[in-house]
Amino acid sequence: MINSRIQIGLIAGVLIALGVGLTLYKAVSLNLPLLPGEYREVWTVESKTSFTPAKGPVNVELRLPASLAGWVILDEHFVSSGFGFSIIEASDAVSTARWTRQSLDRPTTLYYKMQIYRERSDRALPNMAADVPTKPLLEADQQAAMDRLIDRIAEQSSDNESFALLLVQELLRDSQDQDRLFLLSSYADNSLALMLDTLAMANISAHELRGIELEDGRRRQTLSSLLEVRSAGQWFVINPQTGRVGLPANFFIWQRGDGAILNITGGRNSSLEFALVSNSLPAKAVLGMEQRADEFALLDFSIYTLPVEQQGVFKGLLLIPVAALVVVVMRLLVGVKTSGTFMPILIALAFIQTTLLVGLIIFLGLIGTGLWIRSYLSRLNLLLVARVAAVVIMVILMMAALAVTSYKLGLDQVLTVTFFPTVIVAWTIERMSILWEEEGGHEVLIQGSGSLLVAVLAYLAMSNHWVEHLTFNFPELTLSLLGVILLLGKYTGYRLSELYRFRDMAGK
C-alpha cells in the first residue's frame, strides 16, 4: 500500500504537469501570449435581448453597430437556436440582425457577441449630411416657455456650438427658473429629449448618439446617450449629463442618428442589456482561438466560450486560488497567525474593489468600532446567535453611515465600503472579542496583524497584471496551484517564525 506522502506527491506531480503542459500547448499552438501587454486591449461585448412572447409570429430586429471613432469590430457571433436568422444590409451601410419564428411559448433571450479593439487613438467621427430639423408639436404654454428659453440663450451665444453648450448648462443648472422647471416637468425630466426639441426649434441640426460605456467586468449594462450637434459644417459631441465636449475614450458607439435599436413584433416586456469584459490579447490570437475551438475542444480550457457575463465573474474567481496559495505559504512556511483561513482572502478581494489604502482605513475603522460595540453587548449576557446577529446589524448600519457621510463630503472612494463582506466582518469582530477574553489583547493584535499582512500580500499578488493575465487566459494553471498546495500540505518542518524563535539554540 502506497503511503499518503507518495500518493500526494504523485497526484501533485500530475496536476502540476497537466497545468503547465496545457498552458504551454495553448501558448504554442493557439498563439496565446504568456506575457500581458504585448498586444492591444480587446473588448468582448455581449448583448442580451430578452422578451416575453405574445400570440402569433415573432420577429426581432437588432440594429448592429459599425466601426466608428477608431474602433474595429474583429468578430461577431449570433445565437439563434430555433430561430430563423438573417442579416439585412441597408442602403446607408447600417446592418440589422433579424430573428424570426412562427410561434414561441416561453420567455427567450437572444445573444449577439462581438470582439472590438481601438485601432487608433483618434476619436474623430466621419462627417455626415445634416437633416433639416423637424420641429416638435407643442402646446401653447410649452411653445411660449421654449421660445423664451431660446431667446435668452441666443442672446448669450455666437454660433450653434455655443448655443448647444449654454442650453445643456442651463438645463443641468440647479435653478428655480420657471421656464426651465416647467419644460423639464412637461418632458418628465427627460432632459435629452428636451435638448433635442429645443435645438430643433432653434433650427439647429442635432441627434442622439447611443452607445456603451466600456467598463471591465460590467454586467447588465444599458445603453448611454450623448448629444451630437452640427455647427459650422462639422459635428461635435456633448455629454448631456455633464456638459463636457468630446467623445469619451471609453465610449463605443452603437447607433449614430435617429431610429430604434431594437424592434420586436410578437413580444412584450423586452429589454436590451450588455455584458463587458476586457483582456490584453492579440487580435489574431482571439480570432484563431475561436475559429479553431471545435478542433481543440478537448484541450482548450479557455473561458472565452462562456457568455461574457460569466467571463467577468470568472475573471475574479480565478484569482482566488492565487490568494489561497499566499495564505498557505504564509501560514505553513512562514508561520503567520491569522484570524481564520479564508478571511484574508475575502479582505483581499475587498481591497481590489476599494484600493489598498482606502480598504485598510475602512477595515480598521469597522473592526475597531465593532469591537467596542461587541464589548458592550457582552455585558448584556446575550446568547451567541443573538449577539452575532446584533453585530451584523451594527456593521451594516456603520457601513451605511460611512457611505452616506463620505458621499456628502465628496469622498467617492469611501463609497466602496459596500464591497466588504458584512457577515465575515461581523464574525471577525466576534472571534476577536472571544480571543480577547480568552487570550488577551496581545493575541488579538498578533492574529489581527497577521490577517492584515496576509490580506495585503494576497491583494498584491491578485492585482498584479501578469497574474491577472495568466489566470484569465490560462485557467488550467489552477491545477498546478492545486498541486503545489497539496505538496505544501505535507510539510512538517520548521516554519520561519520558529527558526527565528529558536535562533539562540542553533548556536549552541
Image (cartoon, rainbow, N blue to C red):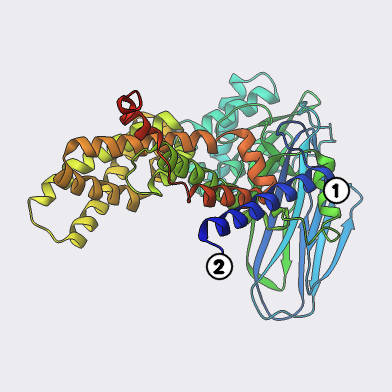
| Left or right placement of residue 409 versus residue 83 in this view | left
Front one among 172 and 86? 86
Q: Position of residue 342 (x, y in %)?
A: 41, 49
Task: Give the number of the mark in front: 2 or 1.
Answer: 2
Q: Which residue is mark 2?
A: 1
Q: Position of residue 241 (x, y in %)?
A: 55, 36
Front one among 7 and 447? 7
Which numbered dot is residue 126? none
Q: Secondary structure at mark 1?
A: helix
| Left or right placement of residue 318 versus residue 228 in this view | left
* Residue that extends furthest to the right in the rendered view of this protein: 91
Residue in the image at 25% along x and 49% along y? 431
Tell me the quarter of the picture where residue 88 sits.
Answer: bottom right
* Residue that extends furthest to the front in the rendered view of this protein: 508
Residue in the image at 7% along x and 50% along y? 379
Front one among 171 and 306? 306
**Marks 2 and 1, Cα distance to the nearest angstrom?**
47 Å
Tell me the quarter of the picture where residue 282 sits.
Answer: top right
Position of the C terminus, as image quadrant, is: top left
Q: Position of residue 325 (x, y in %)?
A: 51, 44
Q: Is residue 274 above or below residue 267?
A: above
Q: Position of residue 182 (x, y in %)?
A: 47, 42
Q: Which residue is mark 1?
A: 288
- Sequence order check, earlier mark of 2 and 1: 2
Front one among 425 and 103? 425
Q: Amino acid at mark 1?
A: Gly
Count residues near mark 2 (Cα–Cα under 10 Å), then give few for <14, some for 14-19, many for 20+. few
Q: Is residue 56 above or below residue 12?
A: below
Q: Secondary structure at mark 2?
A: loop
Position of the N terminus, as image quadrant, is: bottom right
Say if mark 2 contacts mark 1, CB within 8 Å: no
